[in-house]
Image (cartoon, rainbow, N blue to C red):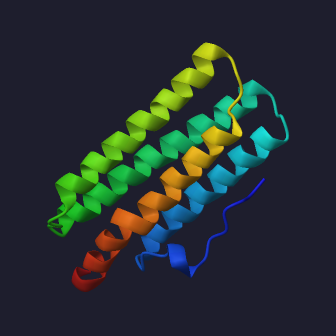
Amino acid sequence: MKLLNWDETLSVQIDEVDEDHRRLIDLFNILNRSVAEGDSPIYIEAVLEELLSCTAWHFRHEERLMLQHAYDGLEEHKAEHKELIESAGELKKKFLQEGTSLTIEDIDYLERWLTGHILGTDMAMGAFLCEVM
């Protein structure tokens, strides 16, 4: 089991966004550990739901900041948020309907999803916000 560690490479240099990202990484690690240790499906479902809820809230937070500061990349960033939420929702749906546990592949997908978004579009947003805030 590989846990994610927060470090400066994941910082977008906007404290409130970085705080959100730290929380998402913490939740990811709780989920990862729970799957690896074979915790009950009910507990894993609760952690997954919390991760998805916090992610949705965080996306709205980012979108508010982008709106407030007239970020040119807002529509593309929102589209990526929508795609990420939909794919994570499909993962949750599969988990609930099939009654199976999350797999290592599911955890790997969520890790790529989380870190890829932070290191990609969020870095561009952070650079813009650093200039205007």
Q: Is residue 111 above or below residue 43?
A: below
Q: Position of residue 71 (x, y in %)?
A: 18, 67
Q: Is residue 123 left or right of residue 93?
A: left
Q: Is residue 115 above or below residue 30?
A: below
Q: Quadrant of the C terminus?
A: bottom left
Q: Quadrant of residue 86?
A: top left
Q: Position of residue 112 (x, y in %)?
A: 53, 54
Residue under the image location 44 percent in, 68 percent down: 119
Identity of the residue furthest to the front in this view: 105
Q: Is residue 47 above or below residue 97?
A: below
Q: Is residue 102 above or below residue 61?
A: above
Q: Is residue 38 left or right of residue 70?
A: right
Q: Position of residue 56 (x, y in %)?
A: 42, 44
Q: Is residue 104 left or right of residue 110?
A: right
Q: Position of residue 69 (x, y in %)?
A: 18, 70
Q: Quadrant of residue 122?
A: bottom left
Viewer-proximal residue, 89 or 56? 89
Residue under the image location 64 percent in, 44 percent down: 107
